[in-house]
Image (cartoon, grey):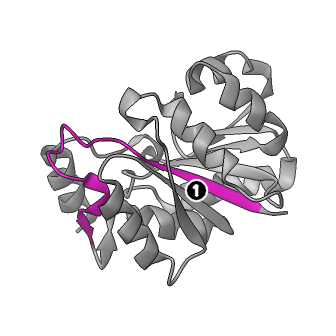
Amino acid sequence: MSLAAVILAAGLSRRMGQPKMLLPWGATSVLGQVVTILAQAGATELVVVSGGARRAVEAEVARLAGDFPVRAVFNAQFEAGEMISSLKTGLAALSSQSEAALIGLGDQPQLSLDSARRVVSAWETSRARLILPSFQFRRGHPWLVARELWIELGAAHTARDFLQARPAEIMYVDCDESVLKDLDTPDDYAKALKNRC
């Protein structure tokens, strides 16, 4: 079973004041940590969708490609601010061998390997078409969507609309709180670094 990952990294990082994907995180970057976790969880093809700070983000992806099967693809519609356009761009770039895709956030370095692996394991054993991580009944990332739903997802107005139209198809997996955490502001980043230590 071949699993891919689409990592959304096309935002403008307005609230952070600088490209948040490139901020240091241990021995790597915020984006590098996300790539590492999703690769360790089982993704054998990773696509990072760039947009804002395109050159810097794609340079970081090129650096990471020395260690991981990752490449960048540019979302020309990123300034519209619609996540679905990045999802569609990322899914369209995946190879025909990938049977499902994890949808991850490039600014989620706190994501635990255990939570990511729980989602992947649930897919490997159930073959469910939609798998969402959950913490205290709140949906998080990365979530998984099987190939047969990619066209429908790309045609949806938003990812939320797509998911809300399929409540009976969703398999929820209990995970830790890391599936809800991302970085939006300098304060978020400072707190995340403190908690990491």
Confirm whether residue 148 shows in the render: yes
Q: Name the residue located 55 percent from the left edge and 31 percent from the top edge.
A: 84
Q: Position of residue 15 (x, y in %)?
A: 18, 37
Q: Residue furthest front?
A: 76
User: How many numbered badges does the structure rendering display?
Assistant: 1
Q: Position of residue 157 (x, y in %)?
A: 59, 18
Q: Quadrant of residue 98?
A: bottom right
96 horizontally vs 162: left or right: right
The residue pinned by badge 1 equals 116
Please give the range of residues in magenta: 3-25
**Residue 22 shown in magenta:** yes
Q: Quadrant of residue 130?
A: top right
Q: Quadrant of residue 16?
A: top left
193 horizontally vs 1: left or right: left
Q: Residue furthest bottom?
A: 66
Confirm whether residue 133 shows in the render: no
Amino acid type, label 1: Ala
Q: Nearer the viewer, residue 195 or 46?
A: 46
Image quarter (top left, top right, bottom left or bottom right) of the N terminus? bottom right
50 horizontally vs 119: left or right: left
Image quarter (top left, top right, bottom left or bottom right) of the C terminus? bottom left
- Work out whether 22 lies above or below 86: below
- Work out whether 165 lies above or below 10: above
Q: Nearer the viewer, residue 58 or 129?
A: 58
Q: Name the residue located 67 percent from the left edge and 31 percent from the top edge.
A: 154
Q: Position of residue 9 (x, y in %)?
A: 41, 49
- Work out whether 178 lies above or below 155: below
Q: Position of residue 68 (x, y in %)?
A: 55, 77
Q: Name the residue located 29 percent from the left edge and 53 percent from the top edge.
A: 53
Q: Nearer the viewer, residue 149 or 144?
A: 149
**Residue 153 shown in magenta:** no
Q: Nearer the viewer, residue 86 or 39?
A: 86
